[in-house]
Structures are given as structure tokens and as C-alpha cells.
Amino acid sequence: SFPNHLRGKADECWDVFESLGVLAAQSVLGGSLARNASRFGPFRKAVDTGEQCSRCGLFAPSTHCGIEICTKSNWCIACTRVPPHLCGNLLRECINLRRVAGGDDKEEQKTDTESMLKRGALSIAQD
């Protein structure tokens, strides 16, 4: 538990337990893809032996990072869809909730998204 006298005003405004799962789900569905279209791209397929993302430090291709890397920023596709105010362990926790097998099946993505929301709340509650 974080001491109350060290918490900022933003701590009261943002419910991390609910929001992290939502952000992970939006990153799968492409929630901020249009907003970031000019900042990122073109994307290239990550090398099969693994390529490290410059933002999160995880390796692509993977179920967390996806299979593409941005040629401008060297970020994985997941990092380009997660808001820029997330960083460090919070960013990695958000991306860890993301589990996409790479299929384009919308029903499968919907089920995956629902489980991400639940896992986000559960994993943070356990910490």
C-alpha cells in the first residue's frame, strides 16, 4: 500500500483496478489506432527469432506484443495502441493482460477482451 501523504491528486481520479483491463482490451480492438495513425507506421513483421520493443522491453512476435514492429519508433503494435501516459511496470502489466493469438475472428477477440477486463481487475487486486 502506498502512503497517503505521497499520493497525488490524480490518484483519486483514476481507478487503476478497472482502467487497466479496459486499456488492454482497447489495445486489442484498436481503440486509439486512428488517433495514432500519423505518429506510427509503416509497420513491418518482427523477425522470427525475436525483436525487442523499444518502449516496453518485451519481445515480438508474441501474444502480448503482437507480430509487427513500427519502423519509425521501433515499438511493438501493442505499445502504439496503449496511451503514452502509461510507462514502466504499469505499461508492462497492461501489455501482459493482452493475449491475442493473431486471429481475425471478431467473436474470439470479444471473448478475449472480456477475459482481459476480468484479469486486469483480478491481477491488480492480488498485488
Image (tube, rainbow, N blue to C red):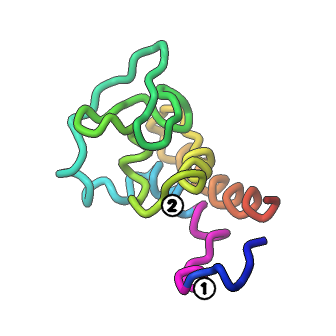
At label 2, which amino acid type do we have? Leu
Prevalent SS, magenta region: helix
Whether 10 is among the magenta residues is yes
Q: Residue 23 shows which numbered tag?
A: 2
Vertical position of residue 54 compared to residue 49: above or below: below
82 and 113: which is toward the camera: 82
- Residue segment shown in magenta: 9-21
Q: Residue 12 shows which numbered tag?
A: 1
Q: Residue at x 73, y 61 (%)?
A: 124
- Whole-number angstrom distance, CA of label 1 to CA of label 2: 18 Å
Quarter of the picture containing the N terminus is: bottom right
56 and 27: which is toward the camera: 56
Q: Residue at x 58, y 56 (%)?
A: 90
Q: Residue at x 40, y 17 (%)?
A: 47
Q: Position of residue 127 (x, y in %)?
A: 79, 59
Compared across the picture, whether 90 is left or right of 40 comes to right
